[in-house]
Image: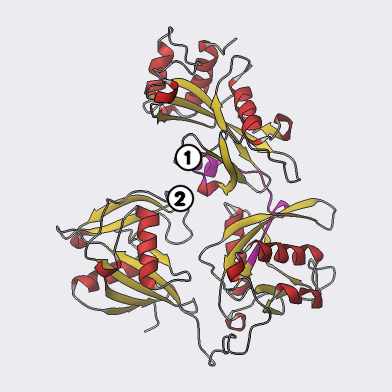
Amino acid sequence: MPLSHEHIRTTVDAYLARHPHEREQLGRLLDVLNRTGDEIASRSTFTGHVTCAAVVIDPLGRVLHVLHLASGKILAPGGHLEPTDQSLAAAALRELHEETGIPPQAVTPWPGYETVPLDIDIHDIDANPGKDEPGHQHFDLRFLFRLHTANEVEVTLQEEEVGGIEWRPVDRAASLSLREKLLKLPLQVEPETANASALIYNDRGEYLLHLRDYFPGEIWEPGMWSLLGGGRESQDATLEHTVRRELAEEAGLDIADLTPFGTEYASDDAGAVVPIAIYAGRWNGDPRELRLTEGVMLAWFAPDDLHRLRIADTTSDLVRRHAASRPASTAPHGPPSPEERRPASPNGTVLNVIGVHLYLERPDGTVLLGLRHPNSQFAPSTWHVLAGHCEQENAIACLIREAREEAGLRIERQDVELVHVVHHIDKAGDQPRMGLFFRARAWSGEPELREPDKCTEWKFWDPAALPDDLVSYTRVAIGKIQNGELYSETGWPA
């Protein structure tokens, strides 16, 4: 028997008691609930009907996403109600099992959310002439669960509906409303119960390893080669924040792009199983130039040389698995020749980070700025031009890529000109940065929020009335561009 109108209404009322400010945005759902003749639990009710999703958090604080083939969107597992569902939460668990193979017994409801959704979302569904379905709306009730197994859960995809899965940090949850609620939750992961490590590699196929201090009984794996990383601390919103903090603290290292590679498990001194999130990133610098604050040294090693080191089997296996996963064209072909090795930098040389910036000015003179996400590592809740770090690419290619990825703007190379260079540091001793500002004389498209985890708003501003909360070197650069000046410096001691 389908779930009753009253069961759904009671659930929605309980949700609104926690989120009364959402009553207006859920008005369409409330209107349908007030019409007793509408079977809101039935997928054939095209005035709008209920769907349920399972928001699953794993022991590392990551949220499960699946690629829904029908919509092409990355979402939490979920779908339509069935007459056999005993509750809305049970419907979410059934969809989780059907789409991913994760059984209901592998998860537990989040305390306080056993019967109340974490989030309710209303979204439009396009017409499907093949199924004789007109356009309609889904009222998606999203229930929160914790994956309570410490082992890798086996996933079996529902191939006709699901194209793949992804575990994302909560600050990268695909749904903005869901992300905001998840970030406010106490994730109940104590600092010592989760670690994060960085698998850093270069274009020669070598891996950066850290020789630990030899303090038996005081540190883990004393005197062994290991990955940079450490334990989660209370201020870390996600384990990506943990690994970035550890890289900065241990070696003054900032990797522009870190991507999740997998999860390892280790036992601490008390025998408890500790999950370790592994993040991979590419870096081509000289480790001798880094400011090492822990351990003895950092050095590059090819996977074939690991057998000569005092290194844990799990670390060695992890490096080899990652090396095997890389494209053959980038894999190392034996030891590098002397010509391939980067020569030692002259004494005192410091690597400068190169950032590209888009100066986009409309015919009315207004300039495009984006409001950075509150959880951004750099300049949270602050306005900034569209910008990014160079990868293995030239600066203009980077600009064109970032404009497309972040805002959906199409820029041609011949329409780009360099209008300013700012050489800046945040404070004395920090890694220096060279900011290249390029003007796009022409472009196609209007700014879109393509990466809402980085930017929450695009807006054109009058250069004479820029926002107060603007990145300081960006303010300087815009002023210099307006005056036709090509170069500036900020942050350096006088």
Residue at figure coordinates x 57%, y 25% from the top left? 116
- Disc number lying in front (2 or 1): 1
The residue lying furthest to the bottom in this view is 347
In primary-sequence order, the first of circles 2 and 1 is 1
Look at label 2 and name its amino acid. Answer: Asp
Pointer 1: what residue? 73
Q: Determine if residue 357 is in view.
A: yes
Residue nearer the viewer, 366 or 414: 414
> 416 or 209: nearer the eye?
416
Choose top left, top right, bottom left or bottom right for residue 383. bottom left
Indicate left or right for 419 with 118 as reference.
left
Q: CA distance from mark 2 to mark 1?
A: 16 Å
Question: Looking at numbered disc 1 in the image, what kind of residue is underneath it?
Answer: Lys
Which dot marks residue 222? none
The residue indicated by pointer 2 is: 453
Q: Quadrant of the C terminus?
A: bottom left
Residue 492 spot, x, y in % from top left: 39, 80
Residue 100 to residue 354: above or below: above
The residue positioned farthest toward the top in the image shown: 37
The magenta span reads: 173-199
Say whether residue 407 is left or right of residue 224. left
Q: Residue at x 40, y 82 (%)?
A: 493
**Residue 29 is a magenta residue:** no
Q: Is residue 97 left or right of 485 when viewed as pictured?
A: right
Q: How far across and down, in percent of the image, does residue 372 sit? A: 39, 55
Q: Kindly state the secondary structure of the residue where label 2 is placed.
A: loop
**Quarter containing the N terminus:** top right
Q: Secondary structure at mark 1?
A: strand
Task: Give the class, few, some or many, for how many residues have Cα within 10 Å of label 1's Cα (few <14, many ≥20).
Answer: few
- Identify the image's colour scheme: rainbow, by chain, secondary structure or one colour: secondary structure
Tell me the crowding category of disc 2: few under 14, some 14 to 19, or many 20 or more residues within 10 angstroms, Cα based.
many
